[in-house]
Image (tube, rainbow, N blue to C red):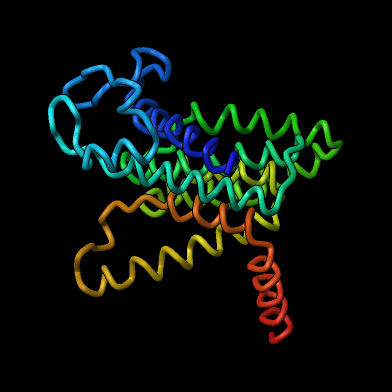
Amino acid sequence: MLYFIFALIIGSFLNVLIHRIPRGESIVFPPSHCPLCAHRLGVGDLIPVLSYIFLRGRCRYCHHRINPRYVVVEVLTALLTLGWAAKFQPDLSGVVHLVFLYLLLVIGFIDLEHQIIPNSLVLPAAVLFLLYRLYQGQLLEAFLGSLLPGGFLFAIALFYPQGMGMGDAKLMAVAGALLGWEKTVAAIFIGSCSGTVLLLPLLCLKKINRKTPVPFGPFLASALILVVLESKVMAFLFRWCEYTFLSF
């Protein structure tokens, strides 16, 4: 229960990051306010999930509709934290992986809304994860984990910018520094497959075309979350790859 309450509070802070960072605003000042009427929010307006329900999804002051993303992020943060608690201990490794999960949630929603992955998020994360791997005595593994998947996506973004952004390459380089190249490559595979499955019907129905800009970050972030929390998926994927390789 404590994890759940803690996660809801963190989810509110993640919403601040998602809203303010792409706009170049301070995450501290001004205090929480309605993005439409700019009225400062009171304590009763800031209770995670419950305020949204009691206010029926509308601002108390201007009555405009509140973006449902706020409550979605709070609920997802709670679910991610519970999933993390089932697999990790609250030690250094666990805390670093929890920060990574929260980072992925923020990046996924920012990219979905603005089609950017801010350097102000990925660069500090890269420093944090490299310092963590240095503390573990695994700095070489971290560099290899960063360069292999990150370099692969960087090459795609360089020669085919319509299909891949530099932000995606930076994200996977940061992920590789923490997770290693095997898990990061697996996440690229999972993200690509999920993106194909979701976008192919839209292409067939002509809702989008090949020139329609589609953010890849949410697919990669979701795949990385899956890789971090679900080891059974990893085992299945490696068995599938091994079977495919031996078949040839």
Q: Where is residue 91, by image quadrant?
A: top right
* Left/right of residue 143 with respect to residue 100 in the rendered view: right
Q: Where is residue 37, by image quadrant?
A: top left
Which residue sits furthest bottom?
Answer: 247
Which residue sits furthest right?
Answer: 137
Q: Where is residue 186, by image quadrant?
A: bottom right
* Left/right of residue 107 with respect to residue 183 in the rendered view: left
Is 95 situated above or below 206?
A: above
Which quadrant: the C terminus?
Answer: bottom right
Q: Position of residue 245 (x, y in %)?
A: 70, 79
For the residue pair 14 and 248, the one nearer the viewer reads as 14
Residue at figure coordinates x 20%, y 31% from the top left: 59
**Is residue 103 in sight in this rendering?**
no
Q: Position of residue 247 (x, y in %)?
A: 69, 87
Residue at figure coordinates x 31%, y 35% from the top left: 51
Which quadrant: the N terminus?
Answer: top right
